[in-house]
Image: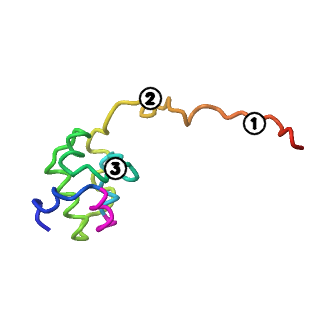
Amino acid sequence: MADTELVDLSVAEIMRRWPATLGVFIDLGMHCVGCPIGVFQTPVEAAAEHHLPLDVLLSELQAAIAGIRVRGARAGSLPRSGTSDAAHGRGASVVPLRPLPPSPRR
């Protein structure tokens, strides 16, 4: 598929047509998988949103579509989008859980 055709599709449509592309978005640190904006956002907009060079995203997508991309090949080589506490180990997932009080129905 030509890049000109790929950039006209939404991110969600790309992932629907070619499930192998899900790994591209995950490995590049993009949060497109399951994102409600993916229905409206093109690869051009997604790359800009995640501060990723468009040519990198398109070449990775093309490789996944062609079946020649090795999953995880680019993981960690590009900065992840945004800066959150979770990236520094201070996310909600590290908060210790407390047991719930007993149910009044018992």
Q: Nearer the viewer, residue 90 or 10?
A: 10
Q: Secondary structure at mark 2?
A: helix
Mark 2, residue position: 85
Q: Nearer the viewer, mark 2 or mark 3?
A: 3
Name the side, left or right, on which 4 lies relative to 75. left
| Nearer mark to the viewer, of 3 and 1 | 3
Taking the spot 19% from the left edge, 63% from the top edge, the residue there is: 62
Q: Secondary structure at mark 3?
A: loop
Report which quarter residue 23 is drawn in. Answer: bottom left
Q: Residue furthest bottom?
A: 67
Q: Secondary structure at mark 1?
A: loop
Q: Which residue is mark 1?
A: 99
User: Is 86 placed left or right of 19 in the picture?
Assistant: right
Percent position of residue 89, x then y: 48, 32
* C-alpha distance separating marks 2 and 3: 20 Å
Q: State the residue in front, 78 or 33.
A: 33
N-term-proximal mark, 1 vs 2: 2
Residue 106 rendering spot, x and y as whole percentages = 89, 44
> Tag count in the figure?
3
Q: In 3D space, how far apart are the residues under numbered discs 1 and 2 (Cα atoms)?
A: 25 Å
Left or right for 98, reference 21: right
Q: Is residue 7 above or below residue 87?
A: below
Q: Amino acid at mark 1?
A: Pro
Residue 17: give x, y in percent of width and height.
Answer: 29, 68
Magenta-tinted stretch: 12-20
Q: Amino acid at mark 2?
A: Asp
Residue 32, position as x, y percentages in the image: 34, 50
- Mark seen at residue 32: 3
Which residue is depicted at the point 21% across and 59% down? 9
* Crowd tier of the residue under label 2, counting other residues whose Cα lies within 10 Å: few below 14, some 14–19, many 20 or above: few
Q: Earlier in the sequence, mark 2 or mark 3?
A: 3
